[in-house]
Image (spheres, rainbow, N blue to C red):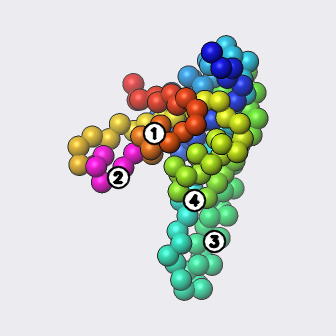
Amino acid sequence: MPEIKRILLPVVFSDNDNLAAGYARQIAMCAGAEVDLVHVTPRVDFISEDILQAVYTSHVGYEKEVAEKLMDAFIEKSLPGVGVRSKVVLSGQPVDEILKYARENAINMIVLPTHTRKGPEAWFVGSVAERVTRKAHCPVLLVHPE
């Protein structure tokens, strides 16, 4: 069995994140692994007017600052006793950024909370979890809400 040394835990700061963190923490403690936290803020490329672009850019900077503070609190509450190798706020499409980060940082496992959307909502919204699972280079553990 391959060694698990780095676990990627993408977070959106929902209750499901805490549940997924419990699994990531347990696996990390058993395997002697470290956890990387990633939060992805969606990037909007279609804003063309200078004033709107400036407002959007300042909002993204503020969102990154808030996300970093939320990650610190999340680590303290949900990942005690686990080595957190990095905490990163990225901007872009969540699936692309999660997969890119995992490849570039030698991630051995992704632990991903899901929202378990059903019916038409799942068809139209799509599933980050489904696409990450399908395209990831490493094992993905999907954690459904209790």
Q: Residues within 10 Å of mark 1 (few under 14, many from 20)?
A: few
Distance of label 2 from label 3 (alpha carbons) = 25 Å
Say the numbered circle drawn on residue 134: 1
Which residue is denoted by mark 2 in the rendering? 125
Q: Say if residue 78 shows up in the picture.
A: no
Regarding mark 1 in the picture, which secondary structure is present there?
helix
Q: Residues within 10 Å of mark 2 (few under 14, many from 20)?
A: few
Magenta span of residues: 121-127
Regarding mark 2 in the picture, which secondary structure is present there?
helix
Which residue is denoted by mark 3 in the rendering? 57
Q: Are marks 1 and 2 in contact (CB under 8 Å)?
A: no
First reached walking from the N terminus: tag 1 or tag 3: 3
First reached walking from the N terminus: tag 4 or tag 1: 4
Relative to 88, does residue 7 appear above or below in the rendering? above
Q: Are marks 1 and 3 in contact (CB under 8 Å)?
A: no
Instruction: Identify which residue is drawn at 62% across, 64% down.
Output: 60
- Tell me the kind of residue under disc 4: Gly
Distance of label 4 from label 1 (alpha carbons) = 19 Å
First reached walking from the N terminus: tag 1 or tag 2: 2
Q: Residues within 10 Å of mark 3 (few under 14, many from 20)?
A: some
Regarding mark 3 in the picture, which secondary structure is present there?
helix
Residue 51 placement, left or right of 126: right
Relative to 99, does residue 49 appear above or below in the rendering? below
Say the numbered circle drawn on residue 55: none
Regarding mark 4 in the picture, which secondary structure is present there?
loop
Say the numbered circle drawn on residue 92: 4
Instruction: Identify which residue is drawn at 55% across, 64% down.
Output: 43
First reached walking from the N terminus: tag 4 or tag 3: 3
Quadrant location of the C terminus? top left
Distance of label 1 from label 3 (alpha carbons) = 32 Å
